[in-house]
Amino acid sequence: MLGTGEDGVLMTETGLEVPMPDGMSAYFNYYWLRDNCPTSFDFETRERVFDVFGLDTGPKAQSAVITGGHLEIVWQGTDHVTRMPLAFLQEYATPGQREDTANLVKTPWYSDHYSNLTRISNAELTADQQALKAWVHAMLTDGVALLTGLPDTDEALFETARMLGHVRPSYFGHSFEVKTHIKPTNLAFTSKALPLHTDLPSEDFAPGVQFLHCRANSVEGGDSLFVDGLAVAEDFRALYPDDFKLLVETDIPYYCEHDTFDMRARQRVIELDESGNISGVTISQHHSDVSDLPQRLLDRYYPAFCRFGRMMRDKKYMMRFRLNAGECIVFDNHRIVHGRAAYSATSGERHLRGCYIDRGEMRSTYRVLAGTGRFQ
Ligand SMILES: [Fe+2]
């Protein structure tokens, strides 16, 4: 049955053609309209409470009109009436993902970024929500920020991390201590040079955001080395498109094994999002497992992998600096590649305390601070 109301709403077998505030017409499926009726959401929990599976037959409009800035639908076979704001319909009138304020354009950075690093003091963060928002904004665009003035306590790291999200444990626990250990289970826990890497690729979902709180750093050497994996991968894509494709399409094995754990997972060195944009990199030579890829594939894979690894070490990309006591470097572990120069363990004390949160929770924090939720 087709029907057109005086206000131009066209009823079809499967949905409505609705004139939109922008002057265009948009089609909306009946299931979608019924499922997303404002009454489908509980005011208190803000969760959907309508059960679309419980419909005996597919929903159909008996009448549909525009009145008072709303589309009003009387449904067939029920006394339920849907009143849906046209402004809400306009948001969904064209296909595409819902606009996301946390989906900010990532800005690649290079070796000279240290002087431009977003720096925020612990005092500012605890006093001002705008400082907190500026911090998350930097995390989403640059993937890194430097916090200053943290107290020299164990709790300071967690208190800082909790501003963005819940601390999520790894197989090393809720936190880890980067200093020379008597029986190290990780290269980071020695005074040797630590090659550029992202943390814990042997986990199914490698940690999203890493916090490193410098408690002490009086040693000779031990400079921090940070590279924007996004900047390298963008250039790599332009210069070596075939190699780029290999690193994007091939899962490789990672491991981390010691007396009490045997972690294994497969990751791609370069990850793309659904739009084809570079969304992350995963690099860790010290956690790369013995490759089980076909040897003939390795004829092509190894040269591409090494070309990318060498490019990452180019001075053009390397931000080298000394992390000082009281500072906390916070970075996206799926984008920022980090390492450390060797240091002399007997020349003083070097102690970083670290933990992780997930990236999704950080984006959630940004949306809440921006006040762009659907239930505002
Ligand atoms: Fe690390």
Image (cartoon, rainbow, N blue to C red):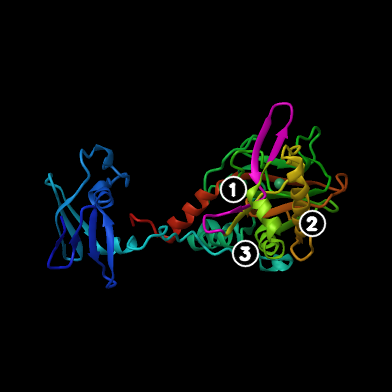
Image depth: mark 1 or mark 2 in front: 2
User: Which residue is disc 3 drawn over?
Assistant: 118
Under mark 3, the amino acid is: Thr
Query: Image height check: is 36 above or below 103?
Result: above
> Label 2: few (<14), some or many (≥20) within 10 Å?
few
Is the C-beta separation of discs 1 and 2 under 8 Å?
A: no
State whether label 3 is within 8 Å of ligand 1. no
Q: Quarter holding the C terminus?
A: bottom left
Q: Is residue 301 left or right of residue 81?
A: right
Under mark 2, the amino acid is: Arg
Query: Image height check: is 291 above or below 359?
Result: above
Is the C-beta separation of discs 2 and 3 under 8 Å?
A: no
Under mark 1, the amino acid is: Gly
> Label 1: few (<14), some or many (≥20) within 10 Å?
many
Image depth: mark 2 or mark 3 in front: 2
Residue 234 location (% of width, % of height): 66, 63
Q: Nearer the viewer, residue 235 or 313?
A: 235
Measure the alpha-carbon separation of dots 1 and 2: 24 Å
* Label disc, if present, on residue 310 of the rendered structure: 2
Is the C-beta separation of discs 1 and 3 under 8 Å?
A: no
User: Which residue is disc 1 drawn over?
Assistant: 208
Q: Residue at x 70, y 36 (%)?
A: 255
- For label 1, the SS is loop
Residue 207 location (% of width, % of height): 61, 44
Residue 145 location (% of width, % of height): 63, 59
Q: Nearer the viewer, residue 331 or 262?
A: 262
Measure the alpha-carbon separation of dots 2 and 3: 28 Å
- For label 3, the SS is loop
Image depth: mark 1 or mark 3 in front: 1
